[in-house]
Amino acid sequence: MCDRFKASIIVLAGLLFCVMAFAQSARPQQPGTAKTQKAASASAPAPRHDLSGTWEPANGPGDGIQANGVKAMPNDGKPEHQLPYTPYGLQVFKSHHALEGADAVLPGFYDDPRDKCEPMGFPRAMFYNLRETQILQNDYKIAILYQYATTWRVIWTDGRPLPKLVEGGVMIGNEPREPRYYGYSVAKWTDDTTLVVQTVGMMGEDRVWLDTAGRPISDQLRVTETLHRADHDHMDWSVTIDDPKMYTKPWVAMDKFPMKLEDPHQDVMEQYCSPIEMEKYNKLFGNPSSGPGSKAPER
């Protein structure tokens, strides 16, 4: 009798388990779960006229370092990556002593203004440690906040014209204005998801470099950026360099560089240039590694 009672209990428990399991598997998944939200976000179209958010290189943080020069045209010694220098542009390039690239010098002889903690300027902010990048916008302007050096630039979208390049700066209407490290930028939407930005009025060749490989730019530089939001979570970024003082024709420095959207609650870590840390690096590593009898190579 006891054994039959135990057997009945076991069968009843088994049936109850099966019913619960069936109910669990047959229950429709509730909307709003993390898995459902992620799938919806991944397939969602790009919002109209909206680039806001925190973005990072889609292929990982290392993709934005660009140690050998701009992403699309690195200074790697390959013929297809040789830039169309003017005679003056080549002269200025050879006067620069870069720590990276095919023409790199020993650490004790580089003269990159960045390593004196000078402002990076634009467009070099796009070509040096491009990592987490925050974009904020309203009806009149867009602000881009770069992780490195905690710097930002403003792009006007209110219909104002691009300032006119003149000797020593730009003209805004009848008002002469000074050159700026990050220039003067205006932009227009060419369709629902594509923004084209024009920038002029940057610092000259005596103050800034284009990239870590020591490529030059001048105060005659015009930069065109195309930011295309492919879908809700992905954007590609292109940059064209047009500097008739340094180069014989425009060329593409960044060709549809892929970025992906991060969690809006992401707290971006600081990256900065510290004069004290740079001095310590040069004392402990840079100068000793160059050797006592070393000298900067001629190019």
Image (cartoon, helix red, strand yellow):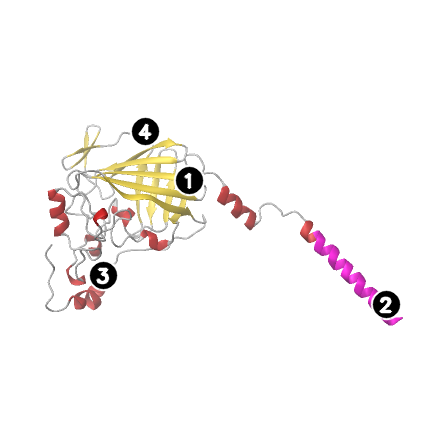
Q: Amino acid at mark 1?
A: Ala
Q: Are marks 4 and 3 in contact (CB under 8 Å)?
A: no
Residue 193, image x, y percentages: 40, 35
Q: Are marks 1 and 4 in contact (CB under 8 Å)?
A: no
Would you say residue 4 sits in the magenta stretch? yes
Question: Along the line of sight, which residue is nearer the eye, 82 or 61?
Answer: 82
Residue 5: numbered disc: 2
Quadrant of the image occupied by residue 86: top left
Residue 107, image x, y percentages: 18, 62
Q: Determine whether, in the image, residue 180 is placed left or right of residue 32.
A: left
Residue at which label 3 appears: 278
Residue at which label 1 appears: 230
The residues bearing labels 3 and 2 have C-alpha atoms spaced at a distance of: 82 Å
Residue at which label 4 appears: 159
Question: Along the line of sight, which residue is nearer the eye, 235 or 265?
Answer: 235
Look at the numbered disc 2 and give the secondary structure of its residue: helix
Residue 66, image x, y percentages: 28, 52
Look at the numbered disc 1 and give the secondary structure of its residue: strand
- Of the two numbered discs 3 and 2 in the rendering, the one whose residue sits closer to the viewer: 2
Q: Amino acid at mark 2?
A: Phe
Quadrant of the image occupied by residue 289: bottom left
- Residue at 32%, 29% in the rendered image: 159
Furthest-front residue in this view: 79
